[in-house]
Amino acid sequence: MTQGVLSRGLWVLLIATLLTAPWLLPLIGDAFWLSILTEILIWSCFAASINFLLGYVGLLSFGQALYFGFGMYGVALGLTALGLGFWPSFFLGLVASALMALVTGIFAVRLTWHYFAIITVVFSLIFYFIALTIKPITGGDDGINFSAPEIFRLGDFTITFANPIDQYFFVLLVVVLCFVIVKIIVASPYGRSLIAIRDNDTRAALIGLNVYRLRLSAFVISGLLAGVSGSLFALFGRYASASYMFYHVSGEGVVWAIVGGVGTLMGPFVGTSLFVLIREIISSHWQHHALIVGAFAILVVIYAPKGIVGFWNDRMARKLSVGRK
Amino acid sequence: MTPFLRIEHLSKSFGGLKAVNDVSLDLMPGSINAIIGPNGAGKTTLFNLISGFIPSDSGQIIFEGEDITKLKPFEISRLGIKRTLQIKSIFPSMTAYENIWMSANAHLQNLHPFKRWTTYADVRRKVEEVIEYFALQKLADVPAGTLSYGDVALLEIGMAVAADPRVILLDEPVCGMSPSETEQVVSRILALAKHFHIVIIEHDMEVVFRMADQITVMAFGAVLATGTPAEIAANQKVKDVYFGTEEDLA
Amino acid sequence: MSSTIAVLAINGLVFGLIIALIALGLSIIFGLLDVINLSHGDFFMIGTVIAYTVITSTGLFWPAFILAPLIGLILGALIHLMVIKPLKNAAALTIVATFGLSMIIQEVVRMTFGAAPKRLMPPIEGTFNLFGVDYEIYRIFAAVASVVAIGAFFVFLKKTKLGTWMRAVRHDRDTATALGIPTQKVFMITFGLGFAMAAMGGVVAAPITTVDFRTGVDILPFCFMAVIIGGLGNLPGTAAAAVLLAFMEGVISGFADPTIARICSLVLMSMVLLFRPQGLFKGLTK
């Protein structure tokens, strides 16, 4: 079996599983696993935002929770305080997160490496504390609740978030769209320029690339991905809380992205799935699953720094070259 | 004949040290210009100033009539001034082909975010031309980070050529190479000089005297002498700076 | 009203001195090893836990002052050997590793010590009259203890062989190695020392703060603020910044929400990062 056939087979399996999950999962377990899968998809998008910046641009942002938060509150406040409908609220979340990424990025992208990572945390902390302070609007750590919005209505027929299957497919559609867009961007001249900057930003400037502007645009794209995740999260949980803007959320996203495999397309999905499943499966038996998360993070980083998907890709490449000999 | 690059009273200090001290230089077209001098003479600092890496304290750099003194590196690159670095610098995770592709594509300022990068036929043609010219076919699909030092040097020059440059600044292009590698690179540079303005920093005197039409000698941040190879070889001040005066040897 | 602000300001001063001790530990780790140590706040927390355990099991406070730094030194050295050193300074990876470490430390403490926050009675009881308020004598002791510890640290750096090695490695790693200084050992000791200083800060602070597995999370940003605003590599600057920030936050808390005070410090930190990355105090101290 060649690598091509193997990976295509895996893709088909994955797509088939994702499409039939609402009916497959209740057969092998509880229907509540569909909810977990939906959550995995939502957080994969968050991990993907970190992976995009780190894997393809070489920038480690430890503050993506900020844009997640703007997406989340954009939807929540749109639906509640502003009385907007579903689609306007959803887009409000996206626009808010992208704008925030632009404004903070203008400053953050001027810095490199350690200082960039630090300032992304600082910005996210500032807005976390602001969100706590304006509790009447944001609900602070307690948050705001609202009811499941309708996506579409035609007479008596509705597609609504209150229906777990409708909800799952909407999330699946949006997240898959995001992953596909990332894949296309990475293979484009723009994406290749980002990778060049990651490899060697001096040489990139020397061949005529405007490194600052390219990094800034990538930062906005990344912020938008985090905002998508936040918007979907608010719709899914019917809930928005400042606590999701705290740096711990950003940190977990970084762990998922790195364990999954930085610079790979499916790394974010694999890493997120792993940790959400660990949380679900283990926490019901043992309340100290955080130990496993921490230990896992450390072990992967030392022994398999390319992450699960990276490790897999390397093994496949090696098998291919051995097969050729 | 007007110079393609004029440097006028250029100065740069680092702390108390004057790395480039009131340097004025005219680089003429149609000749390979070499800049030589002992270590610490300020040659690479001069290149860094020209390509915009560091800001100058005073003075001007004029390229084809345009003042480029305050421009950023990527802006200077876009004007057609390309350069190689002393410590060879390419994109290690990309193949040699992709490296050259990046340079050619950046020259066209193509940043399309959605079309697949392989679909640009004009860029592809350019890259294949350059690979052909530098005989890099065997290395085209090898990650540049694994290439030998000599191949990386060739790749760097190839990347510069792929971007339709007007000037190529070569910083020690044959540094650390075997005699056969050196020969390869030298013949390439001589051929390239017919199409582009070339400025070289080099330590290998044999190479310099073979290739250069104009030699500028720098020492202690200042220009010591400028002239043809014959004039420089005969210049007593140059000999002193390289071999030491009678007093030093005593 | 003004006496409340005065008291808050002095509280800020006291806390600032304790934070200065902890932040100095962070600064040497960041400065020498280039590691952003996200578990540094948890090192502090362990110090508070050690203090609590020592007091409740022996009735004495003083052993904690020896035990905590010692445990910190050993644990820190071990962590460096097992977690940091294998990563060879890959920046993203070390951040993740220290983040994972932080999770493990917090969870282990939660498992053994429990999740409920506990309070400790100050070993030096009694108050005295300060601006018309009964001010705890222990707080003054805490401030003095911190100053002594910080002083000892600077003496160590200047006068001992190990301290000189650390300064050499910080100044120029390659030259230090070429001179025969065992840089890997220096890294290990630096990490251990950083942990020890944070733990010491924890012991000093334990009677005036809650002992809880989450206290590290609050301390961490504060320490980073002190390091950045004081200037990376500028140790006296870091200590000064810690005191200044805590003092400033104390005063602001007098007439606004403490959260607002924290926001102000963070904004100041952003300004420094963006416009004066060498820190506010560069050039003012040697």
Image (cartoon, coloured by chain):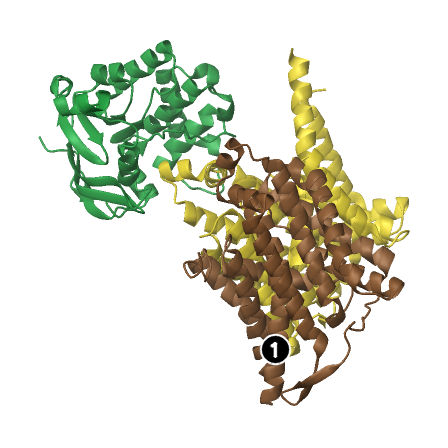
Chain colours: A yellow, B green, C brown
Q: Is B9 or A41 nearer to us in this picture?
A: B9
State left or right for residue B104 relative to residue C175: left
* Chain under numbered label 1: C
Q: Quadrant of the C terminus of chain B?
A: top left
Three-letter code, disc 1: Ile
Q: Is residue A207 above or below residue C31?
A: above
x 37%, y 13%: residue = B181
The image position of residue B28, as x and y in percent, is 14, 29
Residue C193 drawn above or below residue A4: below
Q: Is residue B43 above or below residue C62?
A: above
**In which quadrant of the rendered view does residue C110 lie?**
bottom right
Is residue B164 shown left or right of residue C90? left
The answer to whether one can see residue A287 in this image is yes
The answer to whether residue B31 of the structure is visible from this angle is no
Residue B65, by quadrant, is: top left
Residue C164 image offset from top left, x and y in percent: 55, 45
Q: Position of residue A61 (x, y in %)?
A: 57, 51
Image quadrant occupied by the N terminus of chain B? top left
Of residues A197 and C111, the one drawn nearer to the viewer in this rendering? C111
Residue at 46% in and 40% down: A197
State the residue position of label 1: C10
* Left or right, residue C174 beside residue B14: right
Say above or below: A115 vs A75: above
Residue C108 x/y as whole percent = 82, 53
SS label for mark 1: helix
Comparing B239 with C227, the one in front is B239
- Tell me the crowding category of disc 1: few under 14, some 14 to 19, or many 20 or more residues within 10 angstroms, Cα based: many
Residue name at image x 82 percent, y 64 percent:
C52
